[in-house]
Image (cartoon, rainbow, N blue to C red):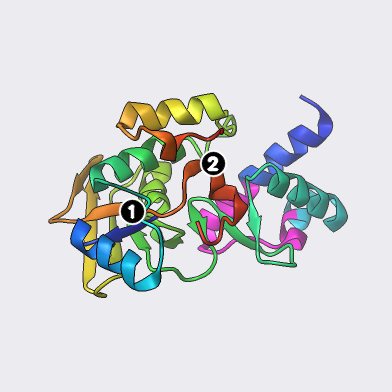
Amino acid sequence: MGAAEAFDREVRLFVYRHFVDEGEPPTAAQVADRLGKSTEDVEASFRRLEAAHVLVFAPGTLNIWMANPLCAFPTTFRVTTERGSWWGTCVWDAFGIPAMLDEDAAIATSCPDCSEPMEFRLEGGSLTVDDGVAHFAVPARRWWDNIGYT
Amino acid sequence: MLAFRSEEHVGRWCETRGIPHGASFSLEQAWELGRRWYGDKLSPDWRRATPDEAERVFTDIGLTGDFWRLRA
């Protein structure tokens, strides 16, 4: 593993752990401070991680928007475990949060058509739902054409 | 990827917004997708799945057909 790859791995892990612990992603300056590196080095790592589709930034910035399955901005998917609450980018990511944390969770969302609230519960790795269906509008090969829309 | 109360709601939502109907599948499949995709995301050894690995996950869960292919 090269030096840049090893550093990107360290940055990625720090971003995810911070996001889980604090409920929001770190800035490049925060990562730099904690890892004892320059902000420029972390920003270069951020750009490599973006190019590799590991992190997504708010347009025109290096502010983390998504470290999937976690989303920095409010969405229609709120995931709550004993450890905290996070926004999931979509239903796939909302389910991904308890999977990543290996914790039970309640997922609150609403039907986009009628706005009726819906709640899913994950307990011991089993999903409890009354009804519902998942829908993906964008075919797999076009997901990264516009990941925000996807 | 959104969650709807039923397929009827998916159809109405797509129609009123002019969004082409994509793929509908069960919430159990969506949970399995989340579990398979993100279960190791906090591991230091995590790496992004290759297209072959990703397509294998979709197939294992029963998400098949051209919609789920990552390459043309």
For the residues tagged 2 and 1, is the chain the same? yes
The secondary element bearing badge 1 is classed as strand
Magenta region, mostly helix, strand or loop?
helix
Q: Which residue is located at x 43 percent, y 62 percent? A: A86
Residue in the foreground of this view, choosing between B31 and A25 = B31
Question: Residue B7's x, y, as percent?
Answer: 21, 56
Q: CA distance from mark 2 to mark 1?
A: 16 Å
Looking at the rendered image, the quarter that the C terminus of chain B falls into is top right
Specify the subunit that label 1 lies on: A
Q: Is residue B2 left or right of residue A36?
A: left
Q: Is residue A128 magenta?
A: no
Q: Residues within 10 Å of mark 2 (few under 14, many from 20)?
A: some
Q: Amino acid at mark 1?
A: His
Q: State the extent of the magenta-drawn residues as a range.
A: A14-31
Q: Is residue A20 magenta?
A: yes
Q: Amino acid at mark 2?
A: Arg
Query: Looking at the image, can residue A105 be seen?
Result: yes
Question: Residue B68's x, y, as percent?
Answer: 43, 37
Q: Which residue is mark 1?
A: A135
B41 above or below A109?
above
Residue in the foreground of this view, choosing between A90 and A87 = A90
Residue in the foreground of this view, choosing between A85 and B6 = B6
The secondary element bearing badge 2 is classed as helix
Q: Which residue is mark 2?
A: A141
